[in-house]
Amino acid sequence: MSKHEQEYKMIGLNIAYYRKLKGISQLKLAELLGLSRTHISNIEAPNMPTAVSLDTLLDIADTLNIPAKKLLDFHE
């Protein structure tokens, strides 16, 4: 287990929240980012905490048109 497992889980949940808020499917987000839908699904799945690179995190924030810090805010 990663020592940051809980943080990865929260990042994934935040990504899913803002993606749904924008009305974008996992498949559409994956296409916009040039990633597989499975990878997006793994990042968002709370039972499968998946590490995400800083580049990917920033790309996701750009694509969702939100500040990257919102994906790292675990206290909303």
Image: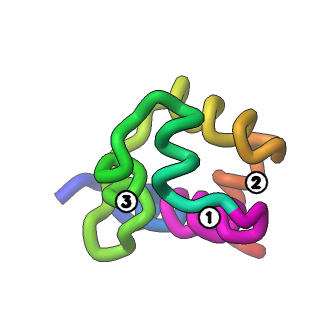
Pointer 3: what residue?
41
Mark pair 3, 2: CA separation: 19 Å
Question: Gap between marks 1 and 2, in whole Å?
Answer: 8 Å
Callout 1–callout 3 Cβ contact below 8 Å:
no
**Looking at the picture, which amino acid does disc 2 mark?**
Lys
Which residue: 66% across, 59% down?
Answer: 24
Q: Give percent across and percent down for residue 26.
A: 50, 57
Q: Residue at x 32, y 61 (%)?
A: 49
Residue 8 painted magenta: no
Q: Are marks 1 and 2 in contact (CB under 8 Å)?
A: yes
Residue sitting nearer the eye, 59 or 27: 27
Measuring 41% from the left and 51% from the top, which residue is drawn there?
Answer: 40
For disc 3, the neighbor class at 10 Å (few under 14, some 14 to 19, many from 20) is some
Circle 1 is placed at which residue position?
Answer: 14
In the image, taking residue 26 as reference, residue 4 lies left or right, namely left
Q: Nearer the viewer, mark 1 or mark 3?
A: 3
Crowdedness near tag 2: few (<14), some (14–19) or many (≥20) residues, C-alpha within 10 Å: some
**Occupied quadrant, residue 44:** bottom left
Q: Which residue is mark 2?
A: 70
Residue 14: percent from left, percent from top: 62, 64
Query: Looking at the image, which is closer to me, 40 or 52?
Result: 40
Q: Are marks 3 and 2 in contact (CB under 8 Å)?
A: no
Q: Secondary structure at mark 2?
A: helix
Labels 3 and 2: the sequence-earlier one: 3
Q: Give the SS element for disc 1.
A: helix
Three-letter amino acid code at disc 1? Asn
Q: Is residue 4 left or right of residue 18?
A: left
Q: Which residues are magenta?
A: 11-23
- Image coordinates of residue 60 in percent, x first then y, are 62, 40
Quadrant location, the C terminus: bottom right
In the shown orientation, is residue 1 left or right of residue 11?
left
Seen at 54% across and 58% down, the residue is 11
